[in-house]
Every structure is written in structure tokens, then in C-alpha cells.
Image (tube, rainbow, N blue to C red):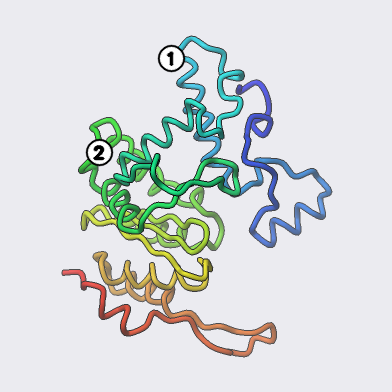
Amino acid sequence: LVARPLHAALECGVQWPSHEVAQREWAESRRPLGALHNNCSGKHAGFLCVGCLMARAQGREPREFVRGYVRADHPVMREVSAALQAATGCDLARAPAGTDGCSIPTYGIALAQLALAFARVATGVGLSPERARAAARLRAAVARAPFFVAGSGRFDTKVMQRLGERVFCKVGAEGVFCAALPEQGLGVAIKIDDGNTARAAEVAMAAAIEALVRLSDDERAFVRGLSDVTLKNWNGIETGALRATAALRDALPAHS
């Protein structure tokens, strides 16, 4: 698999980079887009790694084994679904199911179950010893290299660059945002009804982090800046703001 281009094995589809500057630079270069540019190519590379390890364990040829890994009945996706079910406690066989934009199976999972999954990632409690160790390795890896979670200027990356292992947060699609808070042993799951992650979910997540996580005064000011955002138009004129409401802040338990 290593001998051929990675994008030839990725099954997430082709997508323009979401970063505007990178998008323009790529268009000006006139180079072709590939699956590596898909914003889900990172986790798909992980799926390929899982497939290669499974193939090796079975004495099979990796290139053939990983083909079709996005199908729900493929051994790779069965392993992924088993891990998801173990973390969330959701019976995926009974959950609403569909196909994600990057072609993997996706499921309707309750917010409480998503929060439980991230609490288990934060603590390892409720996971098998092997999965608990894997969760700890993932948290440590993300803390060392948060840029690779989201990239330039993104909320997830900025927060984890500043706060390190105290917060593991990951944005999802359609207004979903989750976080693991290891020191508190908590998981946080947010869903914005209109599906707009950047405008509202980030503000709500920043408010939750400010309330729940141990922060210095400088860190608190940094996080508060993410939940109190000034809006300007194309002429640079201030036109409004995005703020966590008093009702939201009052509903969050304060860190002690």
C-alpha cells in the first residue's frame, strides 16, 4: 500500500480544501485535486492503517483487503462500528443509519450517548483495557500535534494548542461539536439545530470549556474571546456579535 500513492486507496472522494487561501493557491496551480484534499482524508488514512494491520494479522495482501473499506459490511468498518458502539453504548443495529458525505456509514446517536463516549475517551472508564489505552494514546497524540486535527485558524486547533491535554475537542458536521475533559472526567456534546457549526456550536463549546476547565486568567480571556465574537461586514464595520447567553452560562456548572 505504501508503494502506491495514498490517494489511490482513499475512498472518501475528492473535495476542495476548505481553507480559502489554500483553495485559491491550489486553483492557481492548476494541479488536479485528489482524495487527499478531502477534509476526512485523515480519518480515512486511519481506516487504511487499520485495514493493513488486519490484513497482516490474517496473512492477506493489504491492497486487496482494504478495497471497499467504506462499506458497512467490510471488516474495517465493522471494527470501527464496534468501537463506536462500545464507546457510546448505542445499539447501532437499531439506530437510524445513512451514508456520510465521505461515504462511510453514519448513525443517529443521542447527544447523551455522544457525551458518554467522550467521557469514556477522557477517562477510559467503561472501555476495555485495550480501547482505554488507545483513547489515551489518541489524546496524547492530539495534544502534541493539534494542528492536524483541524488546521490553520480553526477552533479545535487553537483551543488545543493553548490548553493542551486538558481539552480534546472535535467538530463534526451539521452543528455537532464534542469534547473530552480528562481532568474533570467529563464528555461534552453539542448540537445546533440549524446545523451551522462555526457560528453557534463554537460559541457554546467555548462557554462550556470556560465553565468546566481549570484555566489561568490569560487562558480564560482567550476562551472568552471565542464565546464573544464581534461580527464585521466587508467594509470592516461592526454589525453585531455572537455571544453565549446568560442563560447558557448560568446553566453550566462552574469549575471548582
For residue 8, what is the image quadrant? top right
- Residue at 47 percent of width and 69 percent of height: 193
Q: Quadrant of the C terminus?
A: bottom left
* Residue 253 picture location, percent across and down: 21, 72
Mark 1 or mark 2, which has the lower sequence index?
1
* Residue 255 picture location, percent across and down: 20, 69
Tell me if mark 2 has few (under 14), some (14-19) or many (20+) residues whose alpha carbon lies within 10 angstroms of its own: some
Tag 1: amino acid: Ala
Above or below 36: residue 253: below
Please tell me whether mark 2 sits on a helix, a strand or a loop. Answer: loop
Report, in whole angstroms, how far the alpha carbon at label 1 lies from the one at label 2: 23 Å
- Residue at 25 percent of width and 57 percent of height: 186
* Residue 235 picture location, percent across and down: 69, 86
**Of residues 86 and 252, which is closer to you in this image?**
86
**Of residues 62 and 82, which is closer to you in this image?**
82
Label 2 sits on residue:
127
How many labels sit on residues? 2
- Residue at 23 percent of width and 46 percent of height: 123
229 sits left or right of 109 in the view? right
- Residue at the left extreme of this rendering: 256
80 sits left or right of 134 in the view? right
123 sits left or right of 64 in the view? left
- Residue at 48 percent of width and 79 percent of height: 229
* Residue 175 picture location, percent across and down: 48, 64
**Of residues 214 and 42, which is closer to you in this image?**
42
Please tell me whether mark 1 sits on a helix, a strand or a loop. Answer: helix
Q: Quadrant of the N terminus?
A: top right
Tag 2: amino acid: Leu
Mark sitting on residue 57: 1
